[in-house]
Amino acid sequence: MLANIKSRKFKITTVLDMKPSMDAAAAAAALAAGTAMATGAAPDAGAAAIAPPKSLYGHFRDYCAKWKGVHDTMMPPDAPLDIAWSWLGAFLSILVVALLNYYLS
């Protein structure tokens, strides 16, 4: 495949060397567009390449959807003692930085 890429024979080799996981619509779209698709490409890669670009809202919606997670089981909540120690450590750290800033400047 690498030798064919160097010699610019994209159209013939990409259609013949496709894996069975690629669907015919993606192959036809790649052939019509004159672009080479990688043999390990996802089935939707050809359709995504010729789809109109997403709007800013579409990108933002996709980004926010990633934050939902995979709806797996949630971790158990921390113990109140662990939360208290964490809060005390953060408070004392900020206090030390504030005092150093006050007395050294």
Image (cartoon, rainbow, N blue to C red):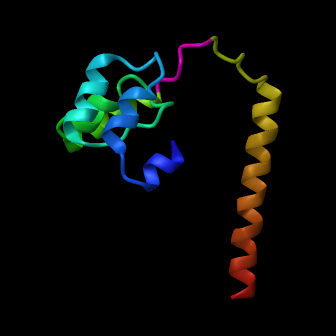
Using the rendered view, name the quadrant where residue 46 is placed.
top left
* Residue 76 visible to the viewer: yes
Q: Is 51 situated left or right of 21 in this image?
A: left
Residue found farthest to the top: 73
Task: Give the magenta-colored segment's residue range.
Answer: 68-72
- In the rendering, at what x and y percent does residue 4 appear? 45, 47
Q: Residue at x 26, y 20 (%)?
A: 25
Return the x and y of residue 1 as percentages of the image width and height. Answer: 51, 41
- Main SS, magenta region, reads loop
Vertical relation: 98 (above or below) 63 = below
Q: Nearer the viewer, residue 87 or 20?
A: 20
The quarter of the picture where residue 57 lies is: top left
In the rendered structure, the answer to whether residue 22 lies left or right of residue 94 reads left
Quadrant including the C terminus:
bottom right
Counting from the top left corner in percent of width and height, residue 40 is at 51, 30
The residue depicted at 75 percent of the width and 24 percent of the height is: 78
Counting from the top left corner in percent of width and height, residue 65 is at 39, 27
Q: Residue at x 39, y 34 (%)?
A: 14
Please say whether residue 54 is visible from this viewpoint. no
Residue located 48% across and 22% down the image: 19
